[in-house]
Amino acid sequence: MGAFTRLRYVIAANVNSLIEKAEDPEKLLRALIREMEDASEEARAACAELLAEQQRLARLDGQLSEEIDQWRGRAEKAVVEDRDDLARAALKAKAELSSRHQAVTDEQQRIAERVTQMETDMVTLKTKLADAKVKLKGLNAGKSVHSVSAQTAEKLTPGERKIRRAMGRFDRLQSQVDNLEARVRSYEVGGTVTSAWNDSTAGTPDPVIEEELAAMKQRISGAKAEKSPDPAAQDSTGAA
């Protein structure tokens, strides 16, 4: 997101070097302080959005987990009823949901890392902003204090304009990347489960599905064997 790039760019700026090269150090320092304050505000808003997205993904994670369990149950029921066709269809639907669940898990991890990085950067920026304000007070020392109104259309020095242009390019580039990521995530996470349950004969056998089906059959067969009484034991009891 643009806020993340802007925050990192502002943090990376060498304030002392910029002030030394500026035609008007006080004017540049005021502009940098405003930039830091704006970046800090944007970062806080972006963090809030990321935290909200984390909550949404957590709910989606739970929903997908429940649906995966439901399709697993349907597959097991189909195996018990000797309906391999329906079992395969249920396992295929479960596999699709599992893939989306993994995509959600990966996205949760990515967002958690981004939030941690932004929180760390905001602490760094807070310190840098405090230092810049101290420097500004130093520049104003010994001068007459005048009431200065903030001018949104204030004329910038060549150095300041260069900073603004560079940050604008970073924001546009990051926005393009974020839009691409959003499209990929919507493809991975969105959509509906394939209607394999209603079209269980379509397609060629999937080796992964066949392997899972075989394992499920073996597990269910073993469970049945454990519950079934031993015929030999019954005979000996009857004879007694």
Image (cartoon, grey):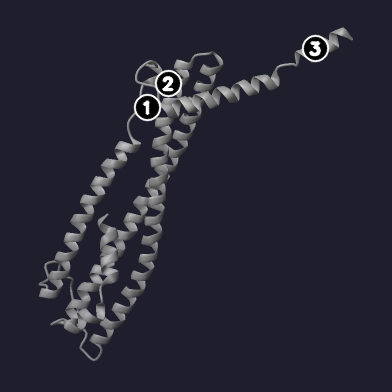
Mark 3 is surrounded, within 10 Å at the Cα level, by few (under 14), some (14 to 19) or many (20 or more) other residues, namely few
Asked if the residue under mark 3 is in contact with the one under mark 1, i.e. CB atoms within 8 Å, the reply is: no
Counting from the top left corner in percent of width and height, residue 90 is at 45, 22
Drawn side of residue 162 relative to residue 124, left or right: left
Query: Does residue 182 lie above or below 125 as drawn?
Result: above
Q: Residue at x 17, y 82 (%)?
A: 21
Specify the farthest residue to the bottom: 142
Marked residue nearer the N-terminal end (3 or 2): 2
Q: Which mark is residue 234?
A: 3
In the rendered structure, which amino acid carries the disc numbered 1?
Val
Counting from the top left corner in percent of width and height, residue 32 is at 23, 73
Counting from the top left corner in percent of width and height, residue 148 is at 18, 76
Marked residue nearer the N-terminal end (1 or 3): 1
Q: How far is the residue under mark 1 from the one under mark 3?
A: 48 Å
Q: Nearer the viewer, residue 120 or 43?
A: 120
In the rendered structure, which amino acid carries the disc numbered 3?
Gln
Q: Residue at x 85, y 8 (%)?
A: 238
Q: Nearer the viewer, residue 221 or 14?
A: 221
Residue tagged 2: 89
**Image depth: mark 3 or mark 2 in front:** 3
Q: Based on the displayed image, in which of its 4 quarters is residue 221 positioned?
A: top right
Q: How far is the residue under mark 1 from the one under mark 2?
A: 11 Å
Q: Which mark is residue 193?
A: 1
Q: Which mark is residue 240?
A: none
Query: Does residue 238 lie above or below 155 as drawn?
Result: above
Secondary-structure class at tag 1: loop
Drawn side of residue 214 relative to residue 97, left or right: right
Counting from the top left corner in percent of width and height, residue 230 is at 75, 16
